[in-house]
Amino acid sequence: MKVRRWFFVFVLVLLGSAWLPLTSAQATPVIDDIAKEGSLTAAWTAEYTETAAVSVASDATNGPLIAVPSGGDVYAKEGSLSAAWTEEWATASKVAIASDATNGPLIAVIDASGNVWAKQGSLTTPWVEEYSGASDAATAVSVASDPKNGPLIVVLTLAGNVYAKEGSLTAAFTTEYTGASSPAVSVASDATNGPLIAVLNDGTVYAKEGSLTAAWLDEYNTASQVAVASDPTNGPLIAVVAGGSLYAKEGSMTGATWLDEYNTATEVSVASDPTNGPLIAVVAGDNDYAKEGSMTGATWTQESSAYRVVAVASDAKNGPVIGLAGAAV
């Protein structure tokens, strides 16, 4: 792995399958990425230095998948927290990952020209160009995957347009949303409920589930962040940060009620699986907390008091995976 003397600052992560900006800044100190797997109280494993961002995914067959940016390059590992790193891409501006037991790891990047590339099946499989940014550059990408519906790739562009494709890396894109202001996007998918897409447009969160052509539902107003997850047993999980508080709902897009989960939140990441239930992680200042198994009955576990970026994943066999980066130094 290469050692760099110039470093990168994380701007925003959105999860079920998060994207990671790689924006250069001067005089940023060396920052470590740590991860844990199996329980909220598991020991931390040091994963990478000279990175300020992390993305995680997991499935019961392939195990944990971790991606980090470093010096403009993207590195990934799969199967174990102690696996070797594979260099995936150079000069990327964003990366997003997902994984499922049938289709394996899914990695998507945005290159320096605003084009989106993706690969699925292994860390060494060839890249496929997904989107050309020649006329409207991609600014964010979010991905998910499940054994029945296959890969889900959603692209957000400079003009605020949202495009999605599902089932194959060579599938055609469907226009999902146009002209979003101050936009963000988060996606998830499971074999029973199908794709789940959430778009943040000028503080309002819209979401749809089951089909790329499903109708949008107005889920929340005055939000600054959104994260989604889904599993066949517990259904959709949507979390938002609004006014510094974390709110979440699970089980239904229309019937579930919003629960006030945490105050003073600055960032959120969510995951869910049929065995372990919902997993919610929050950053509050320099403190990192997580809860699992219930929206109301579970208590928060303090995971760290030193990191400002969190990403989570979960599967029925391996349990929760938590990645932290952006040390408060």
Image: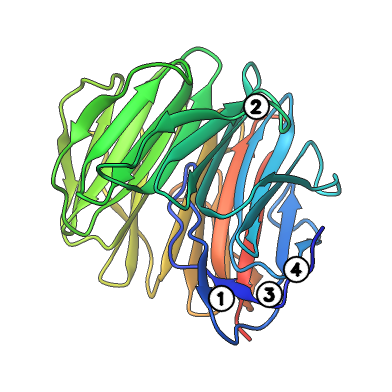
Residue at x 62% of width, y 19% of height: 103
Please name the colour scheme applied to the rendered image: rainbow
Mark 1: give few (<14), some (14-19) or many (20+) Cα within 10 Å.
some
Residue 159, above or below 122: below
Q: Residue at coordinates 18% horizontally, 59% vertically from top-left? A: 203
Disc assigned to residue 126: 2
Q: Position of residue 296 (x, y in %)?
A: 43, 51
Q: Quick check: 265 above or below 272?
A: below
The nearer-to-camera label among 1 and 3 is 3
Is 101 displayed left or right of 22 in the figure? right
- Which quadrant: the C terminus? bottom right
Give whichever of discs 1 and 4 has the lower sequence position.
Answer: 4
Where's residue 186, x and y in %? 37, 44
Tell me how far mark 1 sits from mark 4, CA to CA.
20 Å
The residue type indicated by label 2 comes to Pro
**In terms of secondary structure, where does tag 1 sit?**
strand
Amino acid identity at mark 3: Ile
Q: Mark 4 = which residue? A: 49
Q: Does residue 300 appear in the picture of this structure? A: no
Given the image, on which type of amino acid does mark 4 rest?
Thr
Q: Nearer the viewer, mark 1 or mark 4?
A: 4
The amino acid at mark 1 is Asn
How far apart marks 3 and 2 lie (CA) works out to 30 Å
Lower sequence index among marks 1 and 3:
3
SS at mark 4 in the image:
loop
